[in-house]
Image (cartoon, rainbow, N blue to C red):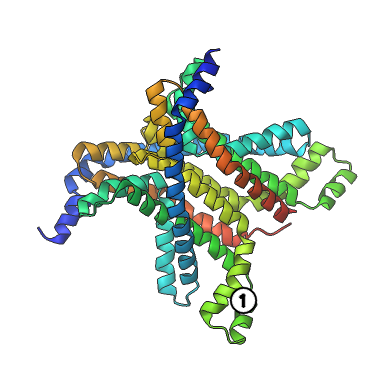
Amino acid sequence: MDVAQQFFNIDVMVRVLPIVLRGLWMTLLICAAVVPLGLFGGLLIAISMQTRWRGPRLALAICIDFFRALPPLFLLIFLYAGLPFIGIHLSPFACVCLAFFLNTSAYYGEVYRAGFESVGAGQWEAARSTGLTGLQAIAYVVLPQAVRNVLPDLISNTVEVVKLTSLASVVALPELLYSADMARAATYNSSPMILAAAIYLFLLWPAVRLISRLEHRIAQ
Amino acid sequence: MSALSLFIDTFFRPDLIERYWLSIVHAMVVTVELAVCIIVTGIALGIGLALLRACGVRIVNFFIVVFSDVNRALPPLVLILLAYFGLPSFGINLPSFAVLWIVLSLVLAAFSEEIFWAGILSIRKGQWDAARSTGLSFAQALLLVVFPQALRLTVPPLTNRTIVIIKNTALGSIIGVPEILNVASTAESFVGNITPLTLGAIAYLILFAPVTVFGRWLETRFAWKRA
């Protein structure tokens, strides 16, 4: 069978497994850096968006929409190619983290914002009137409820971040897709790509199922 | 050289702007063409699958769920590379534009199917019962009563998801589709100056900033409420 040889060649998969697993490790490292950074950056953005002053709020909204309007791959290439020109030399890993941080924290920020809006103003007022400081009211009263309300979106955004890491292959960061693509080119065989796809599915399918379940439960 | 002129020379060199702005405009046209193709086929397929799923045939639904899960879980770049390098083994040789169009249509179909399906699920059972009891057939009740109501709820999430997927047309640069990123980064490495990429950024902002703002507006306007 030609197709089986070309796509599901077990020999090839076994041979390239160490390289692909090293790629997986790099993918997990990028996620371990970008997901917490994005979650934290997004939270900062959403909290800052609650400010009463219109000027800063508008400036922040423009910033968020700027980074949401640019394709993440474009942002990555722009930073990768452009930063050295202004004297900033980052490693590919740092550059990937910076580009994805800018992109994902804008998205996480929007998710948190929707969450904050879903919590009634009364909660905030009640929390403040019991003597909690603003920060305490956010941390102990508003945020837990907000997160619960937008949990499907938070998970879905995190899945997007993991998928986003595959773009790092473009700046030659040897993550999962890059390693699999190198192995494909070296073996003239598509099986390494199928192996990588299987690993992505193994990582993300449970999360995708969970999102669907949560969303359907909200819909019903 | 002063800081300002250094900045201009790095990001906005006039002679390079003059040399490349027209090819960036052509690339914008390619991006828009791709976007229109992907939106039409992707959303049509998504609607078709969601309606098919509403018919409730177990085995069919199983395949719809698998299709939608796989296309939502895999990074689009993996799908694009698989299709681009894999299809020739089946004797199918497609131009890169077609590969990008098909793959992103499938991704959009998968996401939009889920969104339409959630919309259909959110319609109360009473709507079905009332529609059927007036004598409408199942298909009529679905198409004339339930789906139109479901559609309204799907607009904000569908718009935002569509924008995210359309921005993935930038991935076409990897397989040689002459869209904005491809043209801009090829020019950038040719002249060794960032200016073409700045033009690319401006092109993306012209195309996507308005729709991003529009998506945000839709979201606040029709916050996901049940009918």
Estimate the x, y position of residue A208 in percent, counting from the top left: 61, 45
Say which of A213 and A119 sits in front: A213
The tally of labels here is: 1
Q: Which residue is mark 1?
A: A121
Q: Which of A183 and A220 lies nearest the eye of the viewer?
A: A183
Seen at 34% across and 51% down, the residue is A94
How packed mark 1 is, by other alpha carbons closer than 10 Å (few <14, some 14-19, many 20 or more), is few
Q: Is residue A78 positioned above or below A50 on the image?
A: above
Q: Position of residue A108 (x, y in %)?
A: 50, 58
**Residue for point 53% across, 54% down:** B215
* A157 w.r.t. A185: above or below: below
Element type where label 1 sits in the image: helix
Residue B40 seen in the figure? no
| Amino acid type of the residue that numbered disc 1 sits on in the rendered structure | Ala
Judge from the rendering whether residue A149 lies leftward or rightward of residue B209; answer left or right. right
Q: Taking A127 as reference, is A175 left or right?
A: left
Q: Position of residue B213 (x, y in %)?
A: 48, 57
